[in-house]
Image (tube, rainbow, N blue to C red):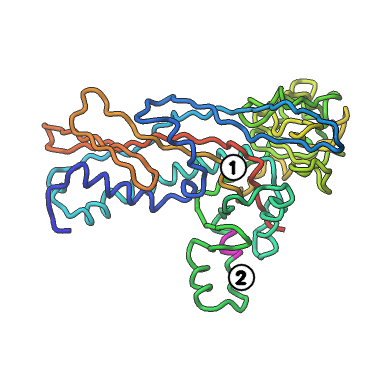
C-alpha cells in the first residue's frame, strides 16, 4: 500500500490482523457464550452458564423418575487489556505495512502473549488432572499420548476436536522424536513449524506462554483431617469449579502451604468413569482452588475441585476419604514445573465482546475480526504535534469444565 494519511479504521484493522495472528489459546477455546453478553457491554457483565445434565438408567420395568439437577457457573467479562501509542504526525504518512512493522507488531505481540497467558493460567490452575512425571521432558510419541489417553479414560467427549499446547522445550523434544521416524517430506515440513498438526488425535501447538506452576511448601505428611468430607451434587453444582471446602492436617506448622494449582491424590479414593460411575484403576486427582498456610497445629482449610461426590449420576470418585488418609501432592515442594495441556475446547470459555464508545470520545473505531472485538480511540497532543492512540479489548475467561483437560509432563 502506498503512503497515505493513516486513519483509525486502517490502523485498527491492521492491529486486529496482527493480534489474531499471534494468539494461540483463543482459537482453541469455546466461544459459544460470547453472544450472550449481547451488544456493547461495560466491564463487569456476568452470565450464568449451565452445567451439562447427566442421567441414570434403571433396571427393570418399574419407573424410577429422576429429579433434574441443573447446576451453573458464573462467567464475568471484566478485564480490559490494551496498548497505547504516541506518534509523531510525520509517521502517520507511512504505509500501513511499514507502520505496522515498526509500531503495531511489537505491541500486538505483547498483548497477544498477555491474553494467552491469562487463558493458560485460568485452565491449568483449575485443572485437577496431571499425567506424567513433573520435570520430565516430553520427548516421544508415547509421552505425549498419555494426555489424550487420560482424556479417553475420563470419558471426555469427542464432540469437538481436542487441542494440545506444549512449551518450546517439550514441543521440540516431541518433534525431534517424530522427525526421526520415516515421515514423508510434507509431514516433516509441518512438524518443523509451530504446529504439530493432527497429532495423537489432537491439534497440537507450541507456545512460549505455557506457564510453570510452583508446588507449595508441602511436608510430605499431609493427611485428611476428619472423616465424611463428601458433599452432594446439589451442594456443589453452582460453585465456580464444582468445588468444596476440604480440611487437611499434617502440614508443617505455620509455614506449610498448599497453593492454588497444586494437584494431589488421597489413598483409596479412585477416579470413576464419568458415564457409568465404575471405578477406574488410578486414584482420583484433585486440584487446590484456594490454598492456605498451615496453622500452628499443622492444619488448614482449602477449597478443592472436583467436589467429593460418591453416588448418583454426578459421581466424581469411588469412596469418601477416611480420616487420616494420606494425601500425596504431585511434584517436589517449592519446585516449578511446565504446565503443558491437552484439552477439549469446552474446558475453557473465552469471550471478547465489543466495547462501547466512551462519552466525550470523538474519533472512535470499533471492529471485529475472527472473533476478536477491539476499539481504537484517537487523540491529539497539540503542544507536541503527536497523535495518541488507545487500543482496547475486553476479555473474560472461565475454566468452565476443567475436568475436560489434563496437564502433561514427560516420563
In the picture, the quarter occupied by the N terminus is: bottom left
Q: Nearer the viewer, residue 62 or 278?
A: 62
Residue at the spot x=49%, y=48% of the render? 25
Residue at the spot x=88%, y=27% of the render? 323
Coordinates of residue 306 in the picture (x, y in percent): 71, 34
Coordinates of residue 320 in the picture (x, y in percent): 84, 31
Query: In the image, which disc is placed on residue 407?
Result: none
The answer to whether marks 1 and 2 mark residues whose Cβ atoms lie closer than 8 Å is: no
Where disc 2 sits, the SS reads: helix
Q: Nearer the viewer, residue 222 or 22?
A: 22
Where disc 1 sits, the SS reads: helix
Residue 173 located within the stretch drawn in magenta: yes
Residue 77 in the figure: left or right of residue 309? left
Residue at the spot x=64%, y=44% of the render? 404
Q: Which residue is mark 2?
A: 178
Coordinates of residue 253 in the picture (x, y in percent): 77, 25
- In front: label 1 or label 2: 1
Residue 4 located within the stretch drawn in magenta: no
Helix, strand or loop: magenta stretch: helix
Q: What segment is highlighted magenta in the picture?
A: 170-174
Dot 2 surroundings within 10 Å: few (below 14), some, or many (20 or more)?
Answer: some
Coordinates of residue 46 in the picture (x, y in percent): 48, 25
Q: Which residue is mark 1?
A: 347
Amino acid at each position: 500500500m502506498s503512503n497515505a494519511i493513516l486513519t483509525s479504521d486502517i490502523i485498527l484493522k491492521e492491529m486486529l490482523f496482527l493480534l489474531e495472528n499471534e494468539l494461540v489459546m483463543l482459537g482453541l477455546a469455546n466461544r459459544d457464550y460470547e453472544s450472550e453478553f449481547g451488544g456493547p457491554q461495560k466491564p463487569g457483565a456476568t452470565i450464568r452458564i449451565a452445567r451439562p445434565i447427566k442421567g441414570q438408567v434403571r433396571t427393570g420395568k418399574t419407573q424410577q423418575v429422576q429429579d433434574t439437577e441443573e447446576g451453573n457457573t458464573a462467567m464475568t467479562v471484566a478485564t480490559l487489556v490494551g496498548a497505547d501509542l504516541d506518534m509523531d504526525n510525520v509517521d502517520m504518512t507511512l504505509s500501513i505495512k511499514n507502520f505496522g512493522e515498526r509500531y503495531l507488531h511489537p505491541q500486538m505481540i505483547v498483548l497477544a502473549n498477555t491474553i494467552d497467558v491469562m487463558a493458560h493460567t485460568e485452565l491449568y490452575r483449575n485443572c485437577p488432572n496431571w499425567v506424567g512425571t513433573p520435570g520430565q521432558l516430553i520427548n516421544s510419541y508415547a509421552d505425549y499420548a498419555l494426555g489424550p489417553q487420560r482424556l479417553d479414560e475420563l470419558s471426555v467427549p469427542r464432540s469437538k476436536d481436542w487441542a494440545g499446547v506444549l512449551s518450546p522445550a517439550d514441543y521440540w523434544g516431541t518433534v525431534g522424536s517424530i522427525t526421526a521416524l520415516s515421515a514423508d517430506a510434507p509431514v516433516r515440513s509441518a512438524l518443523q513449524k509451530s504446529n504439530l498438526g493432527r497429532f495423537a488425535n489432537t491439534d497440537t501447538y507450541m507456545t512460549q506462554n505455557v506457564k510453570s506452576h510452583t508446588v507449595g511448601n508441602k511436608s510430605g505428611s499431609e493427611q485428611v483431617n476428619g472423616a465424611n468430607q463428601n458433599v452432594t451434587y446439589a451442594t456443589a453444582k453452582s460453585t465456580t469449579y464444582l468445588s468444596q471446602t476440604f480440611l487437611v492436617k499434617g502440614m508443617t506448622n505455620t509455614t506449610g502451604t498448599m497453593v492454588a494449582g497444586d494437584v494431589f491424590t488421597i489413598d483409596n479414593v479412585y477416579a470413576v468413569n464419568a458415564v457409568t460411575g465404575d471405578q477406574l484403576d488410578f486414584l482420583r486427582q484433585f486440584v487446590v482452588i484456594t490454598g492456605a498456610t498451615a496453622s500452628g497445629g499443622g492444619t488448614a482449610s482449602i477449597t478443592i475441585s472436583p467436589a467429593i461426590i460418591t453416588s448418583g449420576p454426578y459421581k466424581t470418585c469411588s469412596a469418601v476419604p477416611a480420616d487420616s488418609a494420606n494425601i500425596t501432592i504431585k511434584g517436589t515442594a517449592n519446585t516449578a514445573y511446565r504446565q503443558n495441556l491437552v484439552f477439549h475446547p469446552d474446558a475453557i470459555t473465552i469471550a471478547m465482546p465489543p466495547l462501547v464508545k466512551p462519552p466525550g470520545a470523538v474519533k472512535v473505531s470499533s471492529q471485529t475480526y475472527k472473533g476478536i472485538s477491539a476499539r481504537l480511540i484517537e487523540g491529539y497532543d497539540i503542544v507536541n504535534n503527536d497523535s495518541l492512540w488507545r487500543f482496547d479489548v475486553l476479555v473474560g475467561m472461565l475454566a468452565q469444565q476443567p475436568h475436560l483437560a489434563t496437564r502433561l509432563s514427560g516420563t
